[in-house]
Amino acid sequence: MITQHTASNSSKQISHSQEEQQAFLHQLRHDLLERYRPQLMHGAGPIRVMARVVAELEQGCRANHVSEELMRAEIVNRTIGDINLRGITECEGPAGGPGDYRLLADELGIALPGEHLAGCIASGATYLWLRYQMQECERLLLNEHYDPRIYDIYGVGNPLLRSWLAEEMRQWGIQVPLGQLYLSLGAMDGIDKVLRALRHLYRERQIADVGILFPAPGFNVPEWQARTYGYHLHHFTTLPEHRFKLTASQLDHILQESPDIRIIYLTITNNPTTFAYTPEELQGLHDVLAQYRANGRDIYILADLAYIGTGNPAEDKARMATFAAGENLRSTIFVSSFSKTHTLTGERFGWVTIGNPELAPALTPAWTNSMASLPGEWQLRFMAYYRLIESRPWLAEKLRNFYRLRRSRLIKQLQRINTEQHLFAEVYLDDDATVYNWSHLAEGEDAFSLFEKTGIAGVPGSGFGYSDKYVRFSIGVIPVPEQ
C-alpha cells in the first residue's frame, strides 16, 4: 500500500502499481487543496499559495516514490512566468533551423559548453563569447576613466552602459540623455527605488497624503512596495468588455473622486491578461491627465514596460509613440528590463528612464542610499548581453515566435479540455504578447478545482487583485504538448 502522504514517511516503500500511484497522487492533491483553500480565499499571496501547493505535491509524490513520468502527466506547473531555456523541447522544422527552439539556451549564452539540451549538445560558443565581451567592456570603461571595481558614488551605474540603454529607448521614440537613465537589478528593483524616491520627495515638499492608482488585474508586487512606503493605495477593477484596461472616462472619474492620487502604475502590455493598450486608448489617458496638469495637478505614470518587445514591434512602437514628447514624456517614468523580452530573468538586467529632467536628480537618493554601488561584475555582464542583443537582432524575433508557438498551443489545449469538461466560460485569445494566458472559468470552478480536475496549476485572479472566476496560466517552465 502507498504510505501516508507526508514528507516524514519518505523512507517507506509503496507498491509499483500505476493505479495505486495515480490514486495516491489524486488523493494527495485533493488533501493539499482542501488545506490551502482557506489561505487562497483569505490570504495575502495567492501566487505563492499555488506555487506552494505544487511544490508540496511534488515533494510528497517523490517521498512516496511516485514515478516521474506519472508526475509529469498529472502535475503541470503553469504558475511561474519565467521561461526555462534549458527545458525547451520544441523544434519546428529541421534541426538547427530557425524553428529549433531547443538551441535558444545555447544562442543566448545560458548553456554551458557540452551541455545536453533535449537531444542537442550546446557548443557553449555564446557562453564563452559573453565572458570575452565582459573583458572588452571593462577595458572600454577603464579607457573612459571609469573603474567598475571601485565605489560608484551615485550608485546609478556606469555612463557607457547607460548611454547604450538611452539609445535602446530611442527605438521606441523615447529620447532622453543618459543622465535621466539609471540601472536597476531588474524591473522590480527599479519600481521599488522609484516609489521610495517619490515618497521621500513628497515628504520634503510637505505633502503628507500621496495616493497611487493600481488598475486590476495587474502585477501585485508594486502594491506591496507602495504599501511599505506609506502610499494610500487606490484600486480600480477594470471590466472584461474593456479587455481589462482602464478607460479615459474611468480615469477621469477616479481622479475627481480621489484628489490625493499622484501616481498611476500602468502595465502597457498586461500581466496577467495578455492584453495591451492601443495607441488610441493610451492617448485618451494622456488627454485626461493633461486636463489635470492644466489645473496645477501633477500626476506621474509609472509605466511598466516588462512586455514591450514581446509583441509585434510595429504595434509596440505605436503604443510607445504616445509617450514620446512634451508633457506626456515629462510626466512618465519608464521601467524596463531584459527579463521577459529576452528570457534573462535570473540576470536581473533592468533600468529606469525618467522623462522629466528636473525630476531625475531628485530620484537618485533611492539608488545612493539603498544598494550604494552597483556590482561591477553585474554591470560588465549587462554590457556583454547588450552587445549580444544588439549584434543578433534575430534573437528577439526568434523569442517572439517561440512565445507565440507556446501560447497558441496552450490555447488549443485549454479549448480541447473545455470541449471535454466545460471548465471555462471563455478561453481568451491574446494580443500576441507576453508569456501568459488569461481565461474566465465556468460557474462553480476556481483555480483549485481546475488543478484537481486537469492537473494544470494556474494562478487565481485574486493573485492580481481580481476575481477568482479568472485564472492566469504561464507558458514558462513546462513545454506545451502539441495537439
Image: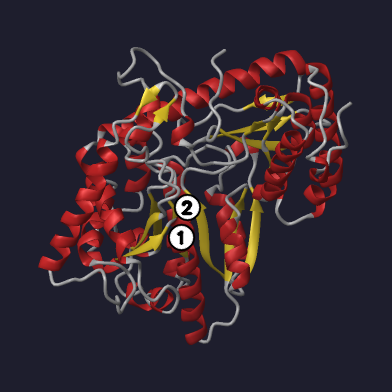
- Badge 2 is on which residue? 285
N-terminal label among 1 and 2: 2
Query: What secondary structure is marked by label 1?
Result: strand
Q: Is residue 314 visible?
A: no
Query: What secondary structure is marked by label 2?
Result: helix
- Badge 1 is on which residue? 301
- Judged left or right of residue 183, residue 81 is right
User: Residue 57 appears in which quarter of the rendering?
Assistant: top right
Rendered location of residue 144, percent (x, y): 12, 68
User: Residue 12 appears in which quarter of the rendering?
Assistant: top right
Q: Is residue 359 visible?
A: yes
State whether residue 270 is above or below residue 190. above
465 or 368: nearer the viewer: 368
296 or 132: nearer the viewer: 132
Amino acid, disc 2? Leu
State whether residue 304 is above or below residue 144. above
State whether residue 300 is above or below residue 348. below
Q: Quadrant of the N terminus?
A: top right
Identity of the residue drawn at 32% across and 47% down: 321
Rendered location of residue 483, percent (x, y): 57, 12
Identity of the residue drawn at 19% across and 61% down: 138
User: Residue 140 appears in which quarter of the rendering?
Assistant: bottom left
The answer to whether the residues at label 1 and label 2 have Cβ atoms under 8 Å apart is yes
Identity of the residue drawn at 48% across and 37% down: 84
Residue furthest to the left: 143
Amino acid, disc 1? Ile
- Label tally: 2
